[in-house]
Image (cartoon, rainbow, N blue to C red):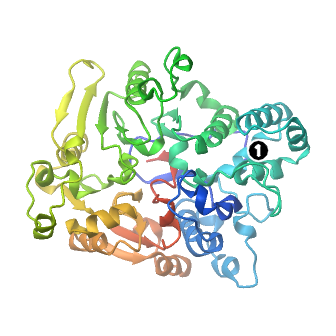
Amino acid sequence: MASSETHRINVSSEVGKLRAVLIHSPDSGLGKVVPSKAQDWLFEDIVHLNTIRAGEYDYYVKLLLYFLDEDKIKGRLAHIDAPERDRNFYKPDHPDFYRSEKVVELQVLLMDILKDAAIKSQLVASVCAIEACSYEVQCRLMEYPHEVLARVFFSGTSDESELIFPPVPNFIFTRDIGIVINDHILLNKPMKEARKREALIAKYIFFHHPVFAGYRSNIIELTDTQHHFLLPNDSEAERVTLEGGDVMVVSKNHVLIGISERTNTEAAAQAVKRLFEKKVVEKATVIKIPNKRDYMHIDTVFTQVKENVWVMLGDFSNERMKGLQTDEVHRVLGVPTRMAHELKIFQFRREDPANPQLFPSLEDLLTDISVTDFGCNPADVHILLSGNNEFPYDAREQWTDSCNLLALGKGVVLGYDRNDKTIDAFREAGFNVVNVKDLLIQLEEGHLHASNLKDTLILMPSAELSRARGGFHCMSMPILRD
């Protein structure tokens, strides 16, 4: 995607047909995460790199290409997957890389901007400052070719033997680096130190890559509160932290912003204020969920499937919010509603921000969005529940991202194959369920075209990917949707 022409950027839906998306395939840095640092780097466990690459994530790349840029893959599947072949098709710095302008690899964008000597010098100095590198290392990095330097910035290593600075394994979760809201880009401010290099690299890409040239004045950056640097480090109220998993663009005039473990109140307030000032949206709903690792972002507790269908954790259903507990297992074990009472939902309108509307439950909000924003009949709105609302599968499957689904189009979503009870909920709602391996064969052989799929849950392999606590909603940053 080295074209000098500005790429069209516009996202005004969670479920409109996906046309272009930013991703980053797992790099060698993932294979260097050690157990003692896994949680510092926001992983629940160490992952097996070859499996996560060739046995899981590659299916995601292939599927995206079939849906978004078929010419890059159609007729090549057998050749790409031949046992004697290496992984050149997936290597951003190799001539055989698929290099799509619709399934856009972040490492390619970084390679492109590093060809500019001035940008290269600034970014090397900035990264070295963040990572406390010696001046000798800084000088050595300046000597690297742009494609090698880009790899180092992502993985922390120039080869298998030398680790220059820590990897940034969370870069596979591209949703968190920024969000396109209509024709604006809201940049993140990560809470954790482990993600600061991600935010810096993303900022340079969005401000300097020619693809985004026409949108530089539409980039929104959040700032820390005045004099924050004079306050104690634990002064949480004065910090501004926001990640993209807490932002959803449900319609052209309506954005959802979460307050969670990773996004705080100050950031949500500042984001709403900036979006209203720039007249990007007419309505902003702020959703405060419990500050728990279980939930992390709002897109771990709900995502949209189509105009009138959502998947959600049952803790935030009307039944649980009202304190009704009909599940006998919950009653006998004395299991609480898992902090559902901490949920708070405020909906602000640009013309009258001082008088927000309150929603008593997440289910009420999602139903209202389907009815008000999409014109659905209330009786036709379906909220599918994680684990089919069966204890303990509801909590188990939410942990492995049953609620974190990516819509390729209305009703066509990607989810993990391990969430059996949630899959049952989709089947009961009338959805087709298909394994990605079988689907790819049908697409390759011409028995099916991606555009013909309707109301389908596509099951993706997940043994290793799920250890990183993120689903395909996390692993995508849409930049263009219908």
The picture places residue 138, in percent across and down from the top left corner, at 85, 38
Considering only vertical position in the picture, is 382 above or below 2? below
In the figure, is residue 55 to the left or right of 252? right
Measuring 53% from the left and 14% from the top, which residue is drawn there?
227
- Residue 89 in the image: x percent, y percent? 71, 68
Q: Amino acid at mark 1?
A: Asp
Q: Position of residue 93 (x, y in %)?
A: 78, 58
Crowdedness near tag 1: few (<14), some (14–19) or many (≥20) residues, C-alpha within 10 Å = many
Q: Place residue 257 in its image quadrant.
A: top left
Reading the image, the residue beneath label 1 is 112
Q: Quadrant of residue 272?
A: top left
Which quadrant of the figure has residue 417?
bottom left
Label 1: state its secondary structure.
Answer: helix
Q: Is residue 72 left or right of residue 343?
A: right
In-front residue for pair 105/287:
287
- Residue 439 at least partly seen: yes
Closer to the camera in the image, 222 or 70:
222
Find residue 468 and report its horizontal and vertical position in percent: 51, 60
Q: Is residue 1 visible?
A: no
In front of the other: 259 or 86: 259
Work out whether residue 458 or residue 147 is closer to the camera in this orientation and state it.
147
Q: Residue furthest bottom?
A: 83
